[in-house]
Image: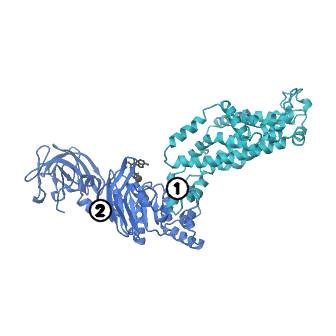
Amino acid sequence: MSATQNRHPAMVLGKYAALAFYLIFALFPLYWLLKIGLTPDELIYSEGTRLFPSEVTFSNFTTVIFQTDFVAYFRNSLVVSLGAAFFTTLFAAGAGYAFSRFVFKGKRIVIAIMLVTQMFPLLMIIAPIYKIVAELGLLNSLISLIVVYTAFNIPFATFLMQSFFDGIPKDLEDAAMMDGCSRFQALCKVVFPLTLPGLGATLGFVFTAAWSELLFALMLISKNDAMTFPVGLLTFVSKFSVDWGQMMAAGVLALIPSCLFFIFIQRYLVQGLTSGAVKG
Amino acid sequence: MARIELRDVAKRYGSVEVLRNIDLEIQDGEFIVLVGPSGCGKSTLLRMVAGLEPISSGEFLIDGERMNDVRPRDRDIAMVFQSYALYPHMDVARNMGFSMEIRKDPVAERKSKVAQAARTLGLTNLTDRLPKALSGGQRQRVAMGRAIIRDPRAFLFDEPLSNLDAALRVEMRLEIARLHQQLSATMIYVTHDQVEALTLADRIVVLNGGDIQQVGSPLELYERPANKFVAQFIGSPTMNVVPVVGTETGVTAGNGTEIKLQDELRTAQAKELGVRPEHIDVVDNGTGDLSAVADVVEHLGSDTNIYVNVEGIGSMMVRKHGNIPVKPGERLGLRIQTENAHLFAKDGTALRRVA
Ligand SMILES: Nc1ncnc2c1ncn2[C@@H]1O[C@H](COP(=O)(O)OP(=O)(O)OP(=O)(O)O)[C@@H](O)[C@H]1O
Ligand SMILES: [Mg+2]
């Protein structure tokens, strides 16, 4: 494992070649997105398969930002994704902590039910959800999306958080309580700082899931001013043509928040925060 | 300073009774060591005293005050965990001063106390390190520092030295003994290690299967074990126990070999004879109480361990001081120091014996 180990140069070369291949493979679609976004409209079909466009323009981007409702979609998506990520993580952290630390009646049943909710294909429940939301008068509101996304992500997020809490030695809380903390203080001062990687992972997971969700957004939102970004993207597809350049430009812009979000939380995702707590 | 009393305390997990009938009175400033085989409930008992585990029944008192339902933070007891349980995101100084931080003691006071504890434990140069940058022994000392800084009524230790290597263990054992002398605080200490138990304890509590087997000073347990379990658990190497039949003059072992005993020891109830390895003398072949063949001989320098096969009885162990020139396969006579022998009844309780 150690990097200082002496290795055969061919092995090192092979390793980097494999990494490079993987990176190119993974990043190529993103490059293509960017490329088409930068290609002037009139060249898209004539030089569609060229690796580099002969001419580069930002007009697609400026059109998307200033002449479409993109900014509104973008803001809606941000509200929905951040809201869903925040509430999901809040509830999942609470439930995950309880599952990890407490013994209580019905724990297994609750866990089983949460697993069951994950077994149904979304298509099956979309009609009932629509009916519920409609009767609550929440159609065409961002709140409905936040609630639905939160509900659907909580089970998985709870299991994720539970596994992070399981990774924090119980002795640490006991020690904090011996040191004079109440259980809540122990949670805030000892457990919480150590769970930051878990919270970061959960936030990131829910944020990206909500950011790119289309099905419910399409069903529950039909008014233009409440549309989220994935729904908005479809407006670039008209009956007679697809505005590839603008669509791709919008796609590139949509990647920005996800990237920023992950740059922001990535330091909390780094493992090893609990090392040194116990023998080892 | 605290006098700790347990009155008929029991612990149940559902229908499983892990501890029962625990009656124990610990004097102010006493050093109590809990020993017993793995899973006998030592940690559970300690955690009940700490308040981390609810007490199922019985009474728990500190200085005469009932404490069953008092939260850990209000018991004013410090605990050193087997796993150390240092807060990984805090440096050494903050780890040690955490209890004072929670109590909102003045910062200046906290700093000076931390510095003092660090000096006592030789951690002065390490106070701004994170636990992950410490060695096992250093972590152990930080865990101790965290406990002593508070000046609590009592200290609890759950196998605090079991993760350390032999040399460090000896050093830390002395440290703990010194600490006890200095603070003269009540201490309860759980260990698997015979030497730790015998050297540190004012009194040892032997637990087995959730019951207290015996409470007494190290010497008492060694010289007058209450039953076969304690006899075999305390003392290293383990006591030899041989099935016998009590007779008019002493006991008869399996093959009819008779071992004469003093008048006070003779009893028809005797079913087993216990002799510690250090209480058997090696004599010329043909003399002594038993005849045996040396099987394995271990020369430890200061002592010699001789594993012998005794005719009609089976294997036993003899330990003699110094270097005994015995070769494997050699025939030996063994003489039992009957004044140090133990007799056990059918149920394992020790029969009367003069000290
Ligand atoms: N939550 C629990 N539910 C059921 N039984 C438990 C629980 N916790 C502990 N026990 C049981 O209680 C008994 C005593 O456990 P304890 O940890 O006190 O043993 P110990 O004497 O400290 O052992 P060791 O020397 O291995 O540390 C064990 O048999 C264990 O299986
Ligand atoms: Mg234990």
Relative side of A8 to B262, left or right: right
Ligand 2 has an atom within 8 Å of the beta carbon of the residue at disc 1: no
Q: Nearer the viewer, residue B274 or B166?
A: B274
Q: Which residue is mark 1?
A: A172
Judging from the image, mark 1 belongs to the subunit labelled A
**Residue A139: quadrant of the picture:** top right
- Quadrant in which the N terminus of chain B is drawn: bottom left
| Amino acid tagged 2 | Pro
Q: Position of residue B44 (x, y in %)?
A: 40, 54
Relative side of B189 to A280, left or right: left
> Which residue is most to the right?
A42
- Quadrant in which the C terminus of chain B is drawn: bottom left
| Label 2 – label 1 distance at C-alpha | 33 Å
Judging from the image, mark 2 belongs to the subunit labelled B
| Amino acid tagged 1 | Leu
Task: Indicate the secondary structure of the residue bearing disc 2.
Answer: helix
